Image: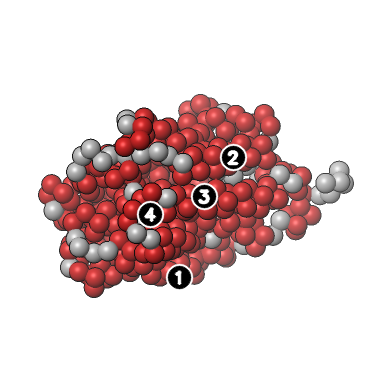
Amino acid sequence: MAHGTSTASVYEQAKPGEIAIGVIIGRTSEFFDFFVYAIASVIVFPKLVFPFVNELTGTIYSFVIFTLAFAARPLGTVIFMAVDRRHGKGAKLVIALFLLGTSTVAIAFLPGYDTIGYAAIWLLAAARILQGIAWGGAWDGLASLLAMNAPSHHRGWYAMVPQLGAPLGLIVASALFAFFAGNLSADDFFDWGWRYPFFVAFAINVVALFARLRMVATDEYSELFESRDLEPARVGETVKEEGRYILLGAFAPLASFALFHMVTVFPLSWVFLFTKESPVRFLIIEMIGAMVGVFAIIASGMIADRVGRKPLLLGSAIAIAVYSGFAPQLLDAGAVGETVYMVGGFILLGLSFGQSSGAIASSFAPAYRYTASALTSDFAWLFGAGFAPLAALLLATHFGLISAGAYLLSGAVWTLVALWLSGLREAEG
């Protein structure tokens, strides 16, 4: 960029619509990777990696490995914030997405327990940890940049844009697994069919890398990040200065993040293990629910611009609390009950998840906002989603589906508490 270019002209070149495209591409690719692994953790890994135990125990072990990526994300943020400070966002993204693609495609080549024994478990766990580290590094700040460049009267609308990646990624991942599982014999599917979605994930990562680099690595966007106080600070210093509000921000979206897995990973595991429902048919139900979720997320943007983001988050948390009291039991009510559970859940998920990103970000001091926002995202996923499938399955298995609803209710309570505390801080300010 020419030295004479003003900051104002940079803003003119970086239109919110252009940033939104990069955000959607990046988030869809990340969530596609996420759901490819999540679906495989239910219908593939228990048989491939844990054939020496029953299906339920194998699924529980699989969910334990599933959580490793969420535990590793903060470590990825620590590592890649240092890369960002020394070498810039372009280098950070290239390394992080290369690591993500490599660890994802490595899973596609994973031999089963019958071939290499317990080494299969360790290799899967290692790949999962590397995925988590890569996800921590793949956080590019574009969502924060989008929010800060959005027109003030359309903040809710632009806040929902990054969240569209979740249902879009689920739709594509579910469609791929449904296609291969529905058109191959069981032997062919477990031998090689399940591996193809992981190859597709690698290809999508490559496309997403170039799309995001086209924006983040330019001089215009580098200056825009700097001028908007979106430069990486040291993690230790950030935690020291903003630790309380990082935790507050992590707990604020807990209701939507817990619901996220309660309508994606957990119901697939329950239906697969405890009903005669075909996993292919339930994946189709998930796709329908995700399509409804897309429209609910879009609606959240319009509603938030009318009533405000926090009132919408409060209202949706209360609605999720009500939903938790009866909805999980619909999973034992056949195809109709499952469809009602999924569609209703995705409506609530769309309204809450659509506005959950960065709800507390404006509370961070400008010097720490970039790093604090990344850490907030890491811990929100860890606390709200990382253990959700494992906890829900264990509770439902031992105490019935109503106990899985109690787990979801706890997430709604934490959201209400966090939003109340953040409101007190704003009032004091």
- Residue where numbered disc 1 is placed: 295
Compute the Cα span from label 1 to label 2. Answer: 32 Å
Q: Amino acid at mark 3?
A: Phe
The residue carrying mark 3 is 199
> How far apart are labels 1 and 4 at the CA level?
36 Å
Residue 75 at what x, y percent from top left?
47, 31
Residue 105 picture location, percent across and down: 51, 43
Residue at the image position 76 percent from the left and 45 percent from the top = 219
- What separation in Å lies between label 2 and label 3 (alpha carbons)? 14 Å
Task: Give the camera-side residue of 93 and 311.
Answer: 93
Q: Residue at x 24, y 70 (%)?
A: 335
Colour scheme in use: secondary structure
Q: Earlier in the sequence, mark 2 or mark 3?
A: 2
- Looking at the image, is 341 positioned above or below residue 76? below
Percent across and percent down for residue 383 are: 35, 42
Q: Is residue 216 visible?
A: yes
Q: Mark 1 Cα within 10 Å, few/some/many (few <14, many 20+)?
A: some
Q: Residues within 10 Å of mark 4 (few under 14, many from 20)?
A: few
Neighbor class of circle 2 (other Cα within 10 Å; few <14, some 14-19, many 20+) is some
Describe the element under mark 3 as helix, strand or loop: helix
Q: Earlier in the sequence, mark 1 or mark 2?
A: 2
Checking the image for residue 98, the label placed there is 2
- Residue type at numbered disc 2: Phe
Residue 188: assigned label: 4
Label 4 sits on what residue type? Asp
Q: Residue at x 46, y 44 (%)?
A: 108
In the picture, measured across the screen, residue 87 lies left or right of residue 124, that is right
